[in-house]
Image (cartoon, coloured by chain):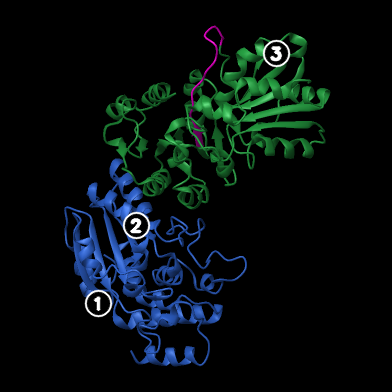
Amino acid sequence: MKSLLDTKQLAAIRRRLLQMHHESGVGHIGGNLSSIDALALLFNERIGDRDAFVLSKGHSAGALYIALWSAGKLREEDLGTFHKDDTLLAGHPPARGIAEIMFATGSLGHGLSLAAGTALARRLQGMEGHTFCLTSDGEWQEGSTWEALIFAAHRRLTNLTVLVDHNGLQGFGHTDEVASMFPLFDRLKGFDVDLQVVSGHDLDAMRAALDTPSDRLKIIVLETTKGKGVSFMENRMEWHYLPLKEPHYSLALEELSRA
Amino acid sequence: MRKQLCDALVARAATPRMVFLTGDLGFMALEPLQTALGERFINAGVAEQNMVSVAAAMARQGMDTWVYSIAPFCYARPFEQIRNDIAFHDLPVRLIGNGGGYGYGVMGPTHHAIEDYGVLLTLPNLRVYVPVFDEDVPAVIEHAGREKKAVYIRLGRGEQPADYAVPDYSPWRELVRGQAAPVVAVGPLASTYISALQSLPIEKRPSLWAVAELPLAHHGLPESLALAIEAHGRVCVAEEHVARGGFASELCLYMMQHGMTAKLVHLHAKAHHYDRYGSQAYLRAQSGLDPQSLLQAIEGN
C-alpha cells in the first residue's frame, strides 16, 4: 500500500492542475476538477505495476496528467508542455509515449470496451492485477457504453472496476435535460453488477467502495461536482470549455489555498 | 470459404494466446472452432462496436486476436473503433468479413459490402486480403496471422471451373494467359472470368490477373503485368467495389507515379442504386461485372 493522500495534498494537486490549464490557456477544467480526486486516489494509492487504467472520458486528460505527476509518473517539465507543439500531453490522452496511458481516448464510448478487453485478456492469460476505467456520466448516452456494460457484466469481470464521474453537466447542458438517464444509479442497477454510489470527493468513501470484495463487475458511481473546489466554477456548464485566465486564476488559487 | 476458414483457425487453436470473437455469427460453420477454443471463443453478441474495441485491447495484451462477422457489420458499424482503437495504436487485430461485395445478394443493401476495402485502406497500419479461391484461405490465414499490422480479410466464394487447377496462393497470380490487353480482377470475381476468357482465341484473349492483397503499394505490380499494360496501352480492372476508393483508383495513381500511360476500363459495383434485388450473380450482372459484360468491355482490345 502506498502512502495515503490527504485533503491538503489534494488541494495542492488542484492548484497544479489549474496552473497547467492557466499556462496553456485551455479549457475542460470543470470535468477535470470533478474527477481529479478519484484519479489522484487511484494513481497514488491503488494502481500498481500489474494494474491497468483506461480514461474513457478522455477530455479529462489534464486531470490524468496531474494525477500521474502527483504519483511521480510524469515530470514537472512534462506538464509545462501541455497542449503545446511537440508535446506528448495532448488535449486528450495520446496513443503512445506514456506507459500508464494504454489508449488514446477522447471519442466517448470507447473506454469501457477497451477496459473490458484488457480485463478479459488478463483473466484468460492468468495474469494478476486489476483494471480500472473512469467514464463520464454524459457518455452513457453512447450506445457503445451500454454494449460494453452488457459484455463486462455478462462475463463477470471481477478484475475490472468502473467509476462514473457523475457530475450532472455535459458539453451543452445538464445531463438530465439533454438526454436524461437520471437517476443513473437506477438504470445501472438493473444489470447483474455490484453497484455502489459514493461521493467522488470523499477519499475514505471511495477507498471503502474500491476495497469492498465483489463476485461481479463493480461499478462505483461517484457523485461529483463539476468545477469542484472553485466556487465560481462549481456546477457551471461554461467551465466545461472556458480557458482559465486572470483574474479567475488568481481567485481560484486563493480559494484553494484556504482549503 | 467459411468451412476453410474454420479449418484453418482450428489448426491454430492450440496457440494459447489465440482468441476469436464473433458478433453472434457463424451458426452451422464455426462450431468446431468454438469447441477447439473453449473459453477463448467469445460470442460478443450483437454489439460490433464493443467487440472491436475489446479485440483491440486483447491484442494490446499480446493475444492473437481474430474478429468475425459478416462483411458489412465487420467494418461499417465499428469503423471508428477500427480507426481509433486498432489502427491508431497499430494493433495486429485480424478482422474477418464474410460475404464481401454482393456476397449476401438478395439479403439486400444493408448486407452488401461494396466499399469495405476502399474505406479501410484510408486508415494507417492496415492491410487487406481478398482470397480468390476457397483453397486460398489456409494460406491467407497463415499470412494474416504473421502480420504485425491489422488485417481485414474479405471472404467470398471461389467460382472457378471444375477442371481448373488452382495455383498456389500468391498476392498476384496470372490465372489465364493471353495476348490481348490484360484484365485485373480483385478477389473471387477473378475466378468467375476464367471460363469466358479461356474460350477466346489466344490472340484475342486477355491475360487475367487476380490480386488478393491490398494496398497495391505493398507488393506493387508484377513486372510482366506492368510490361503488358505498357505494351497494350490499355488495362481493364474489375472489382466488386464501388468506383471511388477502389483498386482502380490505386492502380491509376500507381501507374502515374511510375510514368506508365494506359487507358483504363473500369468495371465496378454500382453504389446501391438498384430498384430490385437478387443473387450475387444477378447483382454482378446489374453492375456489369458478369463475364458477358467483361467480354463486351474488352472487345476490340
Q: Secondary structure at mark 1?
A: loop
Q: Secondary structure at mark 3?
A: loop
* Both labels 2 and 3 in a single chain: no
Mark nearer the N terminus (2 vs 1):
2
The secondary structure making up most of the magenta span is loop
User: In the image, what residue type sits under mark 2?
Assistant: Thr
Q: Chain A takes which shade in the image?
A: blue
Q: Position of residue B218 (x, y in %)?
A: 64, 35
Against B154, residue A15 (above or below) is below
* Residue A145 tag number: 2
> Disc 1 marks which residue?
A202
The 10 Å Cα crowd at callout 1, few under 14, some 14 to 19, many 20 or more, is: some
Against B29, residue A36 (above or below) is below
Q: CA distance from mark 3 to mark 1?
A: 77 Å
Q: Position of residue A106 (x, y in %)?
A: 46, 62
Please report, as a chain letter, where disc 1 is located. Answer: A
Highlighted magenta segment, given as a residue range: B152-165
Q: CA distance from mark 2 to mark 3?
A: 54 Å
> Disc 3 marks which residue?
B177
Query: In screen coordinates, is B189 left or right of B205?
Result: left
Between disc 2 and disc 1, the foreground one is 2
